[in-house]
Image (cartoon, rainbow, N blue to C red):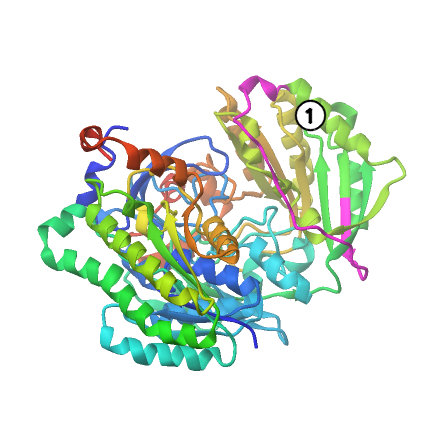
Amino acid sequence: MSDTWVILGASSAVARAFAREAASHGAALVLAGRDMEDLEHQAADLAIRYGVPAMPLRFEARDLATHAGFVAECRRRAGDGLLNVFLAFGVMPDQAAADADPEVAAGMVEANFTGAASVLGALAPVLEAQRGGTVVALGSVAGDRGRKRNFLYGATKAALLVYLQGYAARLSGAGVRVLCIKAGPVDTGMTWALPKLPFMASPRGFAAAAWQRAGKGGGSAYLPGIWWPVMTIIRLLPTPIFNKLNI
Amino acid sequence: MPDTLAAPAATRPTGWKQVSLQGWGRSSLSPCLAARPERLRELHAALDAPEGRTLIAHGGGRSYGDAALNTDGAVVVTGRLDRILGFDPATGELVAEPGVTFADLLEVFLPRGFIAPVSPGTSHVTLGGALANDVHGKNHHHAGSFGEHVLWFDLLLPDGRMQRVSPESDPALFQATVGGIGLTGIVAALCLRLTRVPSNALAVSRRRVRNLDGFLAAFEAAAGATWSVGWIDALAGGASLGRGVLETAEPSEARVESRPPRARRFPVDAPGWLLNGLSVRAFNELYWRRVPAAGQQATVPYRQFLYPLDAIDGWNRMYGKQGFRQFQCVVPPGPGEAALRRLLETVAAGGNASFLAVLKVMGRDGPGMLSFGMPGYSLALDIPARPGSEAIFTQLERITRDSGGRIYLAKDSLLSAEGFAAMYPRAGEFRAVRERVDPQRRLSSDMARRIGL
């Protein structure tokens, strides 16, 4: 029985690329998201290109009550194989929209953090019981330091990182690897309409690097790697200077 | 960076941004708004272009001219809709989204013994683009054009309805969409029948041909070959006019070891002076001499034979910043033979540095109202965009038109509306279908406006 990767937020471009990467290594896929028509397309694509089983499964990050049932279904579909998780869902409305409308702000926190913590929480006993497996979650360089352009988004990702640190500690005894990827901008629908961003990664290149990094163990990692020096400098900037920058 | 670019983003509907696009020839920049849907739902949403702008689908960006450009309008980039939706190994029938490329097909299906029935000269063309331009390959004389192998497609009409169109269900809309340069709707999925092949390789033979008459005779003799193509030294004149190399190929029973491709990248825009008559003459001479006088046989992977230019990523930068234009026409047998000679003489006399020209035999009319294909000879050549180089296209258009031939829209950037009307006799039928499915002309492109569609 091959390993199964559960892709949470499977319709996003990064998740799609990661699913292809996992499938190209022979993994079975559970594609979890809301757009079932799209997930059917993706499942067909993975099955035909890579000859692996790929199954769509409805998942709503903000509907916390459904998470236990969702996790049970994932466990069932993974059969006797190891269950692994790629958490890619998240939204990034712009800061001005979140400032203007508390519903938008709360929605982002619910999706990016509350939903993530809830589903990871529900997955924890399953991961402990199988004594192994890998969890990869998409954080963001935006979580390293709150910038005026998108600090609410950054805050949700910083919260996710701290959650994952504790999560990794809890699961380390069971041999589960937990990796938080501090992602730089990736060329997807999320960034398409934004002004030109530096060091933009392609989804495919990003996914290949994430897969490779996940094979090396848990912790946290900047992807692409150029963000490590960049964010180190940004984190070290004295506050008076940082506050003057329009970043 | 000035924030002016970013400022309007907030007032625009999400998913659109201001971009500057170029055709593959890079001869002009076209500012427009662009959306890049990642799933069907977003494709539907993209149909509603901001500010009442007109719209055109944009696939792999390999049309040389302005077929997929819409200056000050909007484009929908389809490359992210790249899922393979179904495949039946018993029949070879493939269902795919429009952004799937020929490179994808080669990677996924050649190991299973299938190839695209018809393939353009680069694997980076999308299937949606192949349909919209009714592309052809080196096997046109046998296999016809791309559209002949399409069983049906799902077309997102300008009014937002999705219609499955086959040659039987709606013949007029099928024929208007195949080769219809994106003006009837946006393809959301299509069904294509792939061709079975015995191995991953072709048995290729190459031989030198001394001049144009030699070429026409050689094509005649090679009529039974599955694939055939002639590479012509477009700078050779006089008694050597039309000299070149004829390549023919058959599916090979024997496999060859084929490493995954690693394309080299053309690193920079070449300086304009690099491509002068002398350097190109030297290159073309070498290309000719490379093939021994006695001919040459080789077994080569499909990739290498079908997509020779893909070995260098971004080869179009070789023509420098100003870019280049490609001219491709088909001329009928008979009057076309004299026309070929005049076309080659015109280019050679102009001293326009042009790398190898491509000569091919074409077999039959295409299935689309605006299909390029017709029985005769097709000639394609690159001409660097330099001051005055447009004048030569006027001459080439005239010669083509007078011989009863036509110019290929996928390559074109200069054809006149009068020329188009004379070369495409079914344009009236096409307009009637467009009136039916897009009475408000929500779909348009630089090309459509230029050629009077």
Question: In the image, is residue A223 above or below residue B101?
Answer: above
Q: Check if residue B273 falls in the magenta segment.
A: yes
Local crowd size for mark 1, using a 10 Å CA cut-off: few (<14), some (14–19), many (≥20): many
Question: In the image, is residue B77 above or below residue B143?
Answer: above
Indicate the position of residue A72 as horizontal and vertical percent values. 37, 81
* Residue at the image position 53 percent from the left and 50 percent from the top: B125
The stretch of residues the image draws in magenta is B247-276
Residue A59 figure quarter: bottom left
Indicate the position of residue B367 as horizontal and vertical percent values. 54, 60
Specify the quadrant that holds the N terminus of chain B.
Answer: top left
Q: Residue furthest front?
A: A173
Q: Nearer the viewer, residue B8 or A183?
A: A183
Disc 1 target residue = B235
> Helix, strand or loop at disc 1?
loop
Residue type pointed to by label 1: Leu
* Residue at the image position 56 percent from the left and 57 percent from the top: B104
Q: Nearer the viewer, residue B441 or A212?
A: A212
Residue B223 visible to an observer of this rendering? no
* Residue at the image position 62 percent from the left and 19 percent from the top: B276
Q: Residue under mark 1: which chain is it in? A: B
Residue A2 figure quarter: bottom right
Q: Nearer the viewer, residue A185 or B324?
A: A185
Q: Nearer the viewer, residue A164 or B164?
A: A164
Indicate the position of residue B68 as horizontal and vertical percent values. 42, 45
Residue B76 visible to an observer of this rendering? yes
Main secondary structure of the magenta stretch: loop
Q: Residue furthest right?
A: B294
Indicate the position of residue B396 as horizontal and vertical percent values. 56, 32
Q: Is residue B93 left or right of residue A90?
A: right
Q: Check if residue B131 falls in the magenta segment.
A: no
Q: Is residue B173 left or right of residue B266?
A: left
